[in-house]
Amino acid sequence: MKRLIALGAATLMALAGPAIADFQKVSSRAEFVALVDGKTLSRPLVRLQVSSDGRISGRGATWDINGRWQWKGGYLCRSLEWGGDDLGYNCQEVRVNGQRMRITSDRGTGDSAEFKLR
């Protein structure tokens, strides 16, 4: 069920999102932290907090999300658990456009999720 919700949300975001050219790549840890510090990353059914000390927490649908992150080679590398399921380790490209952040798995070659920064 969780995977179906995630797939549906990702599909909707891919259809509704603006072109990637509108988003600027986040290149450094300092830039990333400045963007997310004290904010909630939100999208339908998902609310995340990404702390400067490397923690990720929040909720996706009705399940808790917990994880760790680090900045490596220009990418957000994270390990994540969602509702007790291990989503594994992945390095992701981060792009920003105003108060919107797009995170794309597999160093920018995989699936994307777009969040509002609040």
Image: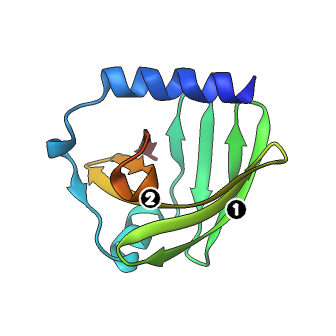
Of labels 2 and 1, the one closer to you: 2
> Which sits earlier in the primary sequence, circle 2 or circle 1?
1
Q: Is residue 92 above or below residue 43?
A: below
Indicate the quadrant where residue 100 lies.
top left
Secondary element at tag 2: strand
Question: Does residue 94 lie above or below 7 as drawn?
Answer: below
- The reply to whether dot 2 and dot 1 touch (C-beta < 8 Å) is no
**Mark 2 highlights which residue?**
92
* Residue nearer the viewer, 6 or 66: 6
- Say what amino acid the circle numbered 1 marks: Gly
Residue 9 in picture, x, y percent from top left? 52, 25
Dot 1 corresponds to which residue? 67
Task: Classify the position of the N terminus by image quarter.
Answer: top right
Work out whether 28 lies above or below 14: below
Residue 37 percent location from the top left of the image: 49, 67
Q: Where is residue 26 in the image (x, y as percent from the top left)?
A: 29, 65
Asked whether 115 or 7 is in front, the reply is: 7
Residue positioned 64% across, 23% down in the render: 5
